[in-house]
Image (spheres, grey):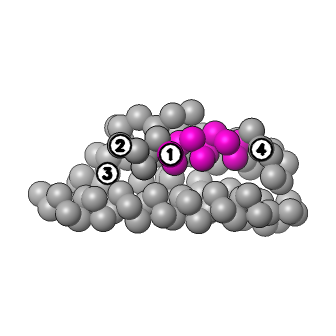
């Protein structure tokens, strides 16, 4: 699921107001937070760690109205620890988001 500008960018823009530097900083902080959770997901070897990282990712996504990422986090919650398919999808989302 690829990143598409929408509610997430609108949320960041609302928080940053007219300050374009703050908008960029918020985008970067969001990307770094997502990357941390992806790293934790990738290193998870038990259900509890996988579930915790997926829940944190879902909470982060919900805080910024990133609906596609919420769906990916839910897919992770439904999956098994280390599921390479969902990890690839989340990494692709992050790569697309970071490239914009």
Tell me which residue sits at (59%, 54%) in the image: 58
Give above or below for 1 relative to 70.
Answer: above
Q: Is residue 31 visible?
A: yes
Tell me which residue sits at (28%, 59%) in the image: 24
Residue 2 pos. (x, y %)? 51, 34
Name the residue beneath numbered marker 3: 11
Name the residue beneath numbered marker 1: 95
Q: Residues within 10 Å of mark 2 (few under 14, many from 20)?
A: few
> Is 81 left, or right, of 39 in this rendering?
right
Name the residue beneath numbered marker 2: 100
Marks 2/3: CA distance? 16 Å
Marks 4/1: CA distance? 16 Å
Question: Does dot 1 land on a helix, a strand or a loop?
Answer: helix
Tell me which residue sits at (30%, 65%) in the image: 25
Q: Magenta segment, principal secondary structure?
A: helix
- Magenta residues span 86-95
- The front one of 7 and 99 is 99
Q: Residues within 10 Å of mark 3 (few under 14, many from 20)?
A: some
Is residue 61 inside the magenta stretch? no
Name the residue beneath numbered marker 4: 84
- The front one of 78 and 21 is 21
């Amino acid at each position: 699921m690829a990143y598409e500008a929408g509610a997430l960018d609108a949320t960041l823009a609302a928080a940053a107001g007219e300050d374009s530097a703050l908008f960029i900083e918020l985008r970067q902080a969001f990307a770094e937070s997502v990357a941390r959770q992806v790293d934790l997901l990738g290193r998870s070897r038990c259900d509890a760690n996988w579930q915790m990282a997926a829940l944190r990712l879902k909470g982060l996504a919900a805080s910024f109205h990133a609906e596609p990422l919420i769906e990916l986090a839910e897919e992770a919650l439904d999956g098994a620890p280390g599921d390479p398919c969902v990890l690839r999808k989340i990494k692709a989302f992050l790569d697309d988001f970071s490239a914009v």
